[in-house]
Image: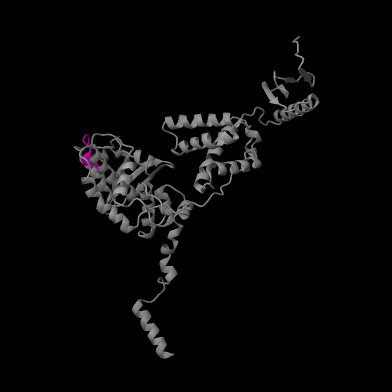
Amino acid sequence: MRQLRDDTHLILDGEVRVYRRERSKRWQAAFVIDGHTIRISTGKRDLAEAKEYARDTFLEYKFRHKNDLPVVTKKFSDVAKLTIADMHKQLDAGLGRKVFSDYIVCIERYLIPFFGAQYVTTIDYEKVQKFYEWRRAKMGREPKASTLNTHNSAMNRVFEEAVARGFIAHKNVPLLVNRGEKSERRPDFTREEYATLIRKLPSWINAGKAGKPTDMRHLMRDYVLIMANTGMRHGTEALNLKWKHVTLFEDGGQQYLEMSVSGKTGRRDIICRSGTINYLKRIHERSEDIRHIPFEDLLKQRVDLPVFRLPDGTVSKNIHQTFRKFLTDTGLITCPRTGQNRTLYSLRHTYATFALLNDGMDIHALAIQMGTSIGMIERHYSHLTPRLKKDMLTGRRFELSRDEYDDHISSSSSSS
């Protein structure tokens, strides 16, 4: 028979072992449930209290096992690391969404530092509220609603991993809420500012150094114009675009340009504004390895090459830097309506603004084209509502013409 140390005691017919580690004054407990060894700290210095705590915990675990509840739980940090590893695996395989990178940063920077040592089964409403306070202090401000969406999604992925592995029951996952500050209006371009941008691009390109710097400026120009005429997302959607994803088709005697883009929200088909084909043709003409292929043949052959490349075939991820220099050099960097600096994302917002104000596109169609939700469109472009409803607000849907109105007023005055 195994000889017990002086600081080890057995309870419940030997099913639970209560013991103390060297140089520790608090009692630990260990027992086996369903083949799994469970070790806990009782947190007690008094032996009688430690035995009572160990007994209650053992019976709780027995109850869990009997009622098909998860028995073996894991610390949040362990589950979070499993979640991160899974997202990295998907990203490396080209299957993961771009937002996974944001989730990973959130988990490592905020969730693990706060929840890391806690077991996923112990995280409840009160602890989540304390996390909100801690995060607010760490950030030095109230997070924006979009930031909270990312944080909530990241935390939900950790709990999904815990549920999938049987570490926690789904009904015990805490409900996360979003009470962040409303997102600010995003910087864009008015029609006049956009016209200025287009007008200044050629001379700015010609002022560049010969060779690759000028090649980058040419590519940036067409990249910018395509972003502004499609509403696609800068970054993943644009960089994933290949010639095989571009299609020309006819309907009712009209020619249309369609692109199949893939990024944050999966793959979707978008229809480009009519002038977009000219920007694609310029890129094609500069591409040394494919310019010998007629443009329409290039599309029909479904060539598996990236669209946005330099003449030598290089794919650059520095277009945003070139665009920022252009905006700075031409005095267009700051949006006067928001006070924020414009970026390549401003072109997507400009597309949405023009579509709503100038094209009369309905919100539902715009949401589909841009790969976002109707709620997101309403949230970020609600400032346009008065202009969208200008006819209704001024009564022009039902009004007389100006001459008719003046005649009506004159006749009313004379009759009175």
Residue 134 placement, left or right of 401 = right
Please say whether residue 310 is visible from this viewpoint: yes
Please say whether residue 160 is visible from this viewpoint: no
Instruction: Give residue 118's quadrant in the image.
Output: top right
Above or below: residue 96 compared with residue 227: above
Residue 171 placement, left or right of 293 = right
Q: What span is colored magenta in the figure?
A: 283-290
Instruction: Give residue 406's quadrant in the image.
Output: bottom left
Residue 289 placement, left or right of 258 = left
List x then y, in percent, for residue 41: 70, 26
For the C terminus, the image quarter is bottom left
Front residue of this view, candidates 4 and 395: 4
Can residue 152 be found in the magenta stretch?
no
Above or below: residue 307 compared with residue 185: above
List x then y, in percent, for residue 387: 41, 63
Front residue of this view, candidates 377 and 21: 21
Q: Name the residue located 22 percent from the left edge and 34 percent from the top edge.
A: 289
Q: Name the residue located 48 percent from the left edge and 54 percent from the top edge.
A: 379
Q: Name the residue located 44 percent from the left edge and 48 percent from the top edge.
A: 372
Outermost residue, left direction? 292
Above or below: residue 58 compared with residue 210: above
Q: Name the residue located 79 percent from the left edge and 28 percent from the top edge.
A: 49
List x then y, in percent, for residue 412: 41, 86
List x then y, in percent, for residue 44: 75, 27
Residue 144 placement, left or right of 58 = left
For the N terminus, the image quarter is top right
